[in-house]
Amino acid sequence: MCEICFGTNAPRTVISWKRRDLMRAFAGGAAALALPACETTTNPETGRGQFILVSDEQMSQAALQAWAQVRQQTPAWSNRTAQQRLERVGMRVAQGAGRGGQQWEFQLFDSPQKNAFVLPGNKVGFYRGLYEMSERDDWMATVLGHEVGHVTGRHAAERYSRELATQTALQVAGSQINSRIAMAALGLGAQVGLSLPFSREQESEADILGINYMQAAGYDPRQAIPFWNAMNSGGGSRPPELLSTHPDPANRIERIRNYINERGWGPA
Ligand SMILES: [Zn+2]
């Protein structure tokens, strides 16, 4: 999910980054790169080793301004009932992920897109188009589980670190370049001509983490199957970046189905 996962429209936002945020983030990266060997950290949520040069706090700081500008430039959907439902399901899923003690922000945007996104710092955007097809709470929980999975998977930090290391290695580092990378890492790269989507691996990981979280929250993980089928059948035209980065829809559903059955939560 996220504008990246679904590939449709990234928020049409021009971000002016706080220079100090970038410099702070970059200082962390430079320090890490000065080490003789780049170490990976193991993500306790997945057991997967990740190359990460920035802290979650740094990513959250960098995302704050982006979030404010997205909110400023994208009309909110003022529907009290819908907003309450989104927050209720969202918080339950966050609790299922063991992140209920953190602050979360869930925002409905008035757009027909069937899409959602997440920014570091637990900021979740959810579009009206997706809300209107989320007829069951289990379907909404499928989306929200996936978005929470990007957070616990530290996918934005991983993406940013990878790009930062590449750019630094090429010695083209500079505040201009780094702000472009930072924007791209947050999924806002379309405006600066640098597309940096979540990888297939990250998308699949978010899917599986999301299934775990919705199940732990008491939702029916089997409902992820009809949800994704509905998404695929009503998807309309898909932009190229979706095709190149998104897991193949049939494979995606098959992988989710197998996982649910393996865990004994099926038959899915
Ligand atoms: Zn995603």
Image: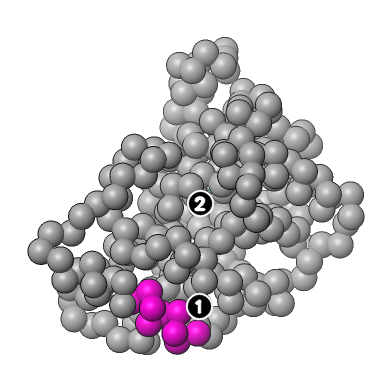
Q: Quadrant of residue 166?
A: bottom left
Residue 1 rendering spot, x and y as whole percentages: 56, 49
Residue 238 appears in the picture as rendered:
no
Residue 89 rendering spot, x and y as whole percentages: 73, 41
Q: Is residue 110 left or right of residue 163?
A: right
Q: Quadrant of residue 138?
A: top right
At horizontal 78% and vertical 37% (from top left) the residue drawn is 135
As shown in the figure, which amino acid type bears the numbered disc 1?
A: Gln
Q: Secondary structure beneath disc 1?
A: helix
Name the foreground residue: 89 vs 4.
89
- The CA span between labels 1 and 2 is 23 Å
As shown in the figure, which amino acid type bears the numbered disc 2?
A: Val
Residue 127 rendering spot, x and y as whole percentages: 71, 56
In the rendered view, how is the structure colored? one colour
**Magenta stretch prevailing secondary structure:** helix
Residue 173 appears in the picture as rendered:
yes
Q: Which mark is residue 191?
A: 1
Q: Which mark is residue 151?
A: 2
Q: Which residues are magenta?
A: 18-26
